[in-house]
Image (cartoon, rainbow, N blue to C red):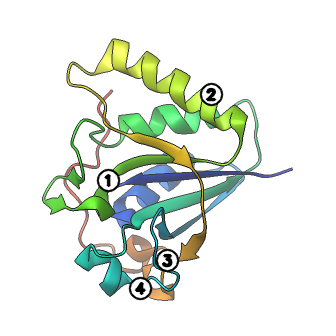
Amino acid sequence: MTNKATFAAGCFWGVEKAFEKQFKGEQFTTRVGYTGGADAHPTYEKVCRGGTQHAEAVQIEYAPSESLSYPMLVEFFYRMHDPTTLDAQGPDHGTQYRSAIFYHSPEQQVVAHRVTAEVQAVRYKNKIVTKIVPAGPWFDAEDYHQKYLVKNPHGYECPSHYLRW
């Protein structure tokens, strides 16, 4: 059985790389794409201009195990970016770079809120502004964006994607 998790935390290239590095060896796959907006035909160019209201996001399909669960993914999401900046990560600004958890079930919604409260209480003095919203339509990014930093190891990587604890 596979589950799906969807996160937005700024530029999707670095987010994808961070998850893949952290959970290397686990049974999961990642895709980068666009979600959370109104445009039925988003493209990288349109999303980057900010008019679609879509976020650059990573979708993870995984087989739950003792070493890979939805709560672990949510906690890692908070470790690898700054969830206290509204519509921005590092030098990237706009709603397309917002911090968001797109839940796929009522159980994911409960877990996302619980882990957010736990992380807020222990790890961040500034208020976490991550949006926790239902997952909507998903649009894969163009092929050249998939595994971009594997294909382009010296490509742009947002400086705000690093482990905080």
> Marks 3/4: CA distance?
14 Å
Reading the image, the residue beneath label 2 is 110
Q: Earlier in the sequence, mark 3 or mark 4?
A: 4
Reading the image, the residue beneath label 3 is 146
Which mark lies nearer to you, 3 or 4? 4
Residue at the farthest front position: 38
Q: Earlier in the sequence, mark 1 or mark 4?
A: 4
Can residue 69 be spotted in the picture?
no
Name the residue: 65% across, 36% down.
Answer: 108
> Marks 1/3: CA distance?
20 Å
**Residue 75 in the image: above or below residue 153:** above
Name the residue: 40% across, 56% down.
Answer: 15
> Marks 1/2: CA distance?
21 Å
Q: Earlier in the sequence, mark 1 or mark 3?
A: 1
Reading the image, the residue beneath label 4 is 43
Q: Secondary structure at mark 1?
A: loop
Q: The disc labelled 4 sits on which kind of residue?
A: Thr
**Residue 55 in the image: above or below residue 135:** below
Mark 4 nearby-residue class (10 Å; few <14, some 14–19, many ≥20): some
User: What is the quadrant of residue 124 in the picture?
Assistant: top left
Q: Earlier in the sequence, mark 2 or mark 4?
A: 4
Reading the image, the residue beneath label 1 is 98
> Marks 3/2: CA distance?
30 Å
Q: Earlier in the sequence, mark 3 or mark 2?
A: 2
